[in-house]
Amino acid sequence: MRPSPATACKLDHEDKRLNIIRGFYGASLFLAIAFSCGTFNPREAHAAGAPESCEASEHGISPGAPDNTAAFKKMLTECAGKQIRLTHGTYTFSPAGYDNGLYIQSGTSIVGDGAEGDAGTVMRIADTGNFASFLWISDASNVSIHGIRFEGTTYESGCTKHLDYGHAITIHSGAGAHAPVETIKITGNQFHNFNGQSWITITAQERSPGVGAHSEIAISKNVFLSDANLRGGCAATGGIGYPVYMVWLHGSDESGDGMIENVSVSSNTFQAAYVKGAVVLWSDTAHIEIQNNTISDAGLRLPPAPQTELGRYAITIYNSAHEKPGHWPDTISVVGNTIVNPVSAGVYVAGARNLEISRNRISGQSDRYDGTLPKGAIALNHAENVRALEGNELVNNYFGIALVATDAPTKNNHVTPAAGGMRTKIWRGEHTPPEIER
């Protein structure tokens, strides 16, 4: 077992309003794991005579096998750069305790028969163990994953022991890599009950060439499902210092070397009741689109903790670098999303610039505790150059729009608060009382 490189999180209370979570798990989230096990060379020559398409059944991989892990790892090498076909059925992977995971080389696509129904393709992790990340796309490009249902394990993620396992897919750019990670497509899949701190994770290490510098990284038309059978994680017990999201983007906190760019998170469905939220963008992220997603119940079924910061945001955009040189999230579009019953906020921003937040439909925000951090259907905390905050339909939220030290127009939105709630709550400065419109 390898300890997580993540550091303990704590909440700094030096300022009532400007307080932002510090010490988050940054771009180094998985680095100790990634580099301890090594990665394949994406330029490695293909096996002689390798077919253009590889059928899993011809490589010893079977829906009836108790453990396909070794056979699939071998297949990923033998079929590097090819299309790997997994016909319908449930393929079981049985790690013995903690395992690093399986690495995909450049040019490889993994295609199933669909993510739904009895005729679909299921990749299931048994309760014998857990992977740091089931699949890794590490310093590899031109990879696609489509038409598969991924089932997480109930085996502990290690979060109570300061270990970090339980992720589904990780896209990673490492220090010293020869080129950015480019052209990744994760489409038409289902993800069910992964217990890591994130499910699909995109990270870039300091001094890495980054992810998506010249092409699109697409996470689209997937379904993310959390339910009452989700076990083995710390979403319910970790407090605000332990964020848990289904899609997680984190570049370097240390500088602009290690950017994540040109990511599209679009047309996905998130059922997020048993995690903290759906999508989070940390520092050194830019040109990101979060569009046309449906997000339900972010954090709603986690245990209540009255008069505390819950951190249950459907979409979060957050400057995790703080005083470090890493860049604020920049040029972010949050457009056309439908968000229902987010506990703390539908869209929460803390330290970001060049934002468009438009044509979203957000209802059911309920967290009233804003003694430290603002809450609302849309809550903006030190956001710069909000280019558009308009056309949003905000209905039955306790707080409609909350602004802290953020200059943004609020009139061009339809806001109807819940009974006793507020249309807007605006702090113009750090030490001035809020302006409230009911």
Image (cartoon, grey):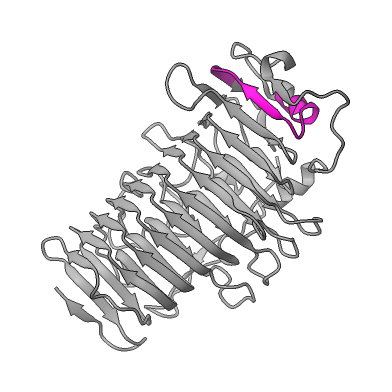
Which residue reaches farthest top?
64
Q: Is residue 90 magenta?
A: yes
**Residue 398 locus on image (x, y percent):** 20, 63
When the figure is inspected, residue 299 is found, relative to residue 352, above or below; the finding is above
**Residue 81 locus on image (x, y percent):** 75, 35
Quarter of the picture containing the C terminus is: bottom left
Which residue reaches farthest front?
52
Label total for image: 0
Q: Which residues are magenta?
A: 72-91
Q: Residue at x 33, y 71 (%)?
A: 389
Q: Residue at x 33, y 60 (%)?
A: 345
Q: Residue 395's image quarter?
A: bottom left
Report the side of 181 relative to 404 (left or right). Answer: right
Q: Is residue 43 magenta?
A: no
When the figure is inspected, residue 438 is found, relative to residue 104, above or below; the finding is below
Report the side of 146 relative to 48 (left or right). Answer: left
Q: Residue 60's image quarter?
A: top right
Task: Please say whether residue 225 is visible from this viewpoint.
Answer: yes
Quarter of the picture containing the N terminus is: top right
Q: Residue at x 44, y 16 (%)?
A: 118
**Residue 212 locus on image (x, y percent):** 64, 56
Task: Please say whether residue 373 is visible from this viewpoint.
Answer: no
* Along the line of sight, the residue nearer the viewer: 367 or 186: 186
When the figure is inspected, residue 215 is found, relative to residue 50, above or below; the finding is below
Report the side of 337 relative to 437 (left or right). Answer: right
